[in-house]
Image (cartoon, helix red, strand yellow):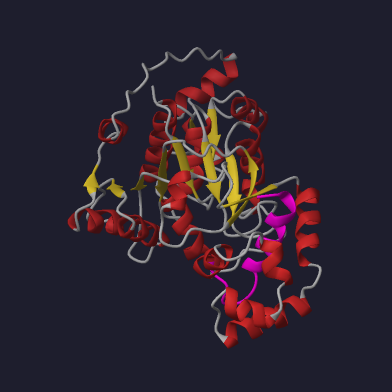
Amino acid sequence: MKSEGRFYLAALTRCPGFGSRTLRKLLAFYQTARDIWESGPEELAVQGQLTPGAVQRLMLFRREQEGLPEQLEASCRRAGCKLCTIEDDVYPVALKEIYDPPVVLFYRGTIEPDARRIAMVGSRRFTPYGEGLALDFGQRLAAAGLTVVSGAARGIDTASHRGARKAGRTVAVLGCGVDVAYPAENRRLLEDIASSGGAVISEYGPGTRPLPAFFPARNRIISGLSEGTLVIEAARRSGSLITAEMALSEGRDVFAIPGSVYSDSSWGCNHLIQQGARLVQSPDDILETYGVSAPPKRKSSHSFTAEERQVWQVLSFEHSLTVDEIIQSMPQGELPNLAFILLQMELKGLVIENELHAYRRAERE
């Protein structure tokens, strides 16, 4: 579709009641989205087979938002993002196959339409157990060539992206504009994803603020992009269970990692396994399902200063420690420049700081 037509189609998606199925029906009768935008009410009623109410809504919307296509094009230019439609070659093939695919996608970075993808989702209120699993699975699945898809939310989503970034590609699907960092502390992570071969994707235009209603719709894109969805931690009312249900409804695989029966954060995963989700204990379980070979594990070749070595020795991959806990654990006593040492170690890729400002080793030994 020509660039001009893309922005008319994006404008039409903003009209109340004009979902992807209505717009795809209209595109079957009109050559371009601009033709739909500029058609009169009588022609729309006949050609587009729209109800009188739908025609009236479109006419009112067009009068109120006359310059919207041009505004969307300008906002994409300012935000440094691109727009593709469901008719474009770059549009992800797997996403076209779901019941209600978005007709337009705004994105930063690179979309690989035929990439093999696995969704990784979980609770915003993570445990050290869940965070470690997300980092480990994300890294090892990405290293094997699967693109890790998640929603860039706090908790398991963020850890999944960070793990994948260490070894391969990851895609973040947002419930807001691609130029909006939500949560704000993930701004740098989103920039890194877009600039390192991955993509930041949304069906909402630049500048769109996150609203609660956007996130269930966002979840269908996460599962729709992916061959399967892995749930790492999920409480009883977790949005991750919605993503898993959407994957099941589209005939996609659902994987779950079991957790303690005494932990509220494991209820969702354990329930999914009861309902027939595939129990996984290592990334190899998923790779074997898709016939993908795990790459040989590389030996770590990090170099440490004497002070970094002291900090490294009290950290683990399994549990994060706050600065105070690191100080209390150091047999040699407090290091006066510990904050600077941790920053240097993070820049080297030795440690990861989570949103609770606690630190853990970036890799399992």
Snapshot quadrant of residue 204: bottom right
Q: Is residue 95 left or right of residue 230?
A: right
Q: 120 or 335: nearer the eye?
A: 120
* Residue 109 appears anywhere in the view: yes
* Residue 208 appears anywhere in the view: no
Q: Which residues are magenta?
A: 1-19
Residue 148 is situated, as x and y percent measured from the top left of the image, at 45, 39
Residue at the spot 53% in from the left edge and 70% down from the top edge: 22
Residue at the spot 60% in from the left edge and 29% down from the top edge: 346
Residue 121 is situated, as x and y percent measured from the top left of the image, at 41, 50
Total numbered labels placed on residues in the image: 0
Residue 141 is situated, as x and y percent measured from the top left of the image, at 39, 32
Q: Is residue 210 left or right of residue 309?
A: right
In this view, 234 is above or below 296: below
Residue at the spot 65% in from the left edge and 78% down from the top edge: 43
Q: 208 or 121: nearer the eye?
A: 208
Q: 173 or 324: nearer the eye?
A: 173
